[in-house]
Image (cartoon, rainbow, N blue to C red):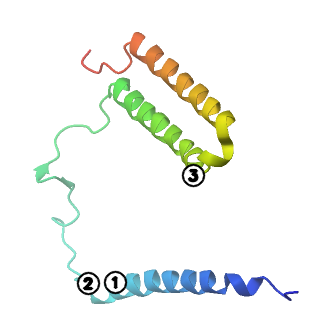
Amino acid sequence: MEKSTLVHYLPIFIMFLIAVAFVVVTMIASHLLGPKKYSKVKYNVFECGIHSEGNARNPFAVKYFLTALLFVLFDVEVIFMYPWATNFKELGMFGVIEVLVFTALLLVGLYYLLKKDVLNINE
């Protein structure tokens, strides 16, 4: 019988320490070796080669945010299908029925969104 199972986690802990050390060393090196030119031009707002004009706090159409949220929602739902796909043979017919119900619920939700015209951002 094994005395300790913590020995099995030693490679993971060593890899974690190497990753943290790499981040710390890179940040310190970039701070020490990087250029240090401070000027007014450097601190001006600059985006995509175009100088900023006007107020950045103008109202934004909610449909853009809604579309992004719906994308994330349906994208995350696909993650729930991965465990089913990996255990397809073990789950048998019960697993197939569950995934069909899950997919049907997703399609009902998508149909509802299409009927409500949520994905139309031209308006």
In the visual, does 93 lie left or right of 41?
A: right
**Residue located 24% across and 18% down the image:** 122
Q: Position of residue 50 (x, y in %)?
A: 11, 49
Q: Quadrant of residue 118?
A: top left
Real-space Cα distance between discs 1 and 2?
Answer: 6 Å
Q: Give, as a three-letter code, the residue at label 3.
A: Thr
Q: Which residue is mark 3?
A: 86
Label 3, label 2: how many angstroms apart (C-alpha)?
A: 47 Å
Quarter of the rendering containing residue 54: top left
Q: Residues within 10 Å of mark 1 (few under 14, many from 20)?
A: few
Quarter residue 40 falls in: bottom left
In the rendered image, residue 85, in percent from the top left (x then y), is placed at: 55, 46
Q: Which mark is residue 34?
A: 2
Nearer to the camera, 82 or 93: 93
Indicate the secondary structure of the residue bearing disc 2: loop
Give how far across and how far down residue 74 sits, in percent.
47, 34
Q: Is residue 20 above or below residue 62?
A: below
Asked if marks 1 and 2 touch (Cβ < 8 Å), the reply is yes
Query: On screen, 12 above or below 43?
Result: below
The amino acid type of the residue labelled 1 equals His
Mark 1 = which residue?
Answer: 31
Residue in front for this viewpoint, 40 or 25:
25
Q: Residue at x 38, y 25 (%)?
A: 62
Please rate how many residues cluster around mark 2, counting C-alpha atoms within 10 Å: few if below 14, some from 14 to 19, many from 20. Answer: few
Q: Is residue 96 left or right of residue 19?
A: right
